[in-house]
Image (spheres, rainbow, N blue to C red):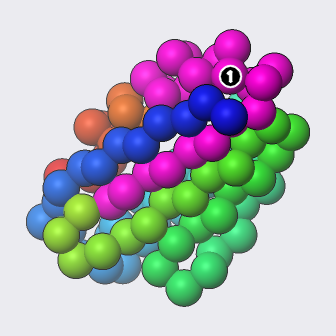
Amino acid sequence: MAGFQIRKPHSMEKAELREAAETLAKQLEGTHGVRARWEGDSVRIKGAGVDGKLTLSDADVLVSVELGLMASAFKGPLRNEVQRFLDEYVS
């Protein structure tokens, strides 16, 4: 499986950070047809050939994504979309 990880430091309040993560999850659900659900301080994202996790901590956000064979063709655009979102909404 192909995949990627992105770690983004932040200085945001937990509630504000959780709201940003919820926005990203909804965006990915709408554009990529994945399902998102909260597991403690993490959002698990699953779909056809996609298994991801967005974990919130006091210091950073960690996005880990594993892609199946067919979904790996979209690794670059998906990574760029997640990075752009984090750069825009997480500070």
Furthest-right residue in view? 48
Question: Mark 1 packing: few (<14 Cα in 10 Å), some, or many (20+)?
Answer: some
Q: Is residue 40 magenta?
A: no
As displayed, is residue 4 above or below residue 73? below
* Residue 79, percent from left and from top: 48, 28
* Residue 54, percent from left and from top: 49, 59
Residue at figure coordinates x 52%, y 17% from the top left: 76
Identify residue type, mark 1. Ser
Furthest-front residue in view? 1
Left/right placement of residue 41 relative to residue 61 reads right
Q: In which quarter of the image is the N terminus?
A: top right
Range of the magenta residues?
Answer: 61-81
Q: Does the magenta stretch include residue 76?
A: yes
As displayed, is residue 10 above or below residue 59? above
Examine the rendering and report whether any part of residue 85 can be seen.
Answer: no
Furthest-left residue in view? 11
Examine the rendering and report whether any part of residue 37 can be seen.
Answer: yes
The front one of 61 and 19 is 61
* Residue 52, percent from left and from top: 62, 52
Residue at figure coordinates x 17%, y 60% from the top left: 10
Residue at disc 1, secondary structure:
helix
Left/right placement of residue 39 relative to residue 82 reads right
Left/right placement of residue 63 relative to residue 70 reads left
Numbered-mark total: 1
As displayed, is residue 76 above or below residue 56? above
Residue at figure coordinates x 76%, y 53% from the top left: 46
Residue at figure coordinates x 81%, y 21% from the top left: 70
The residue labelled by disc 1 is 72
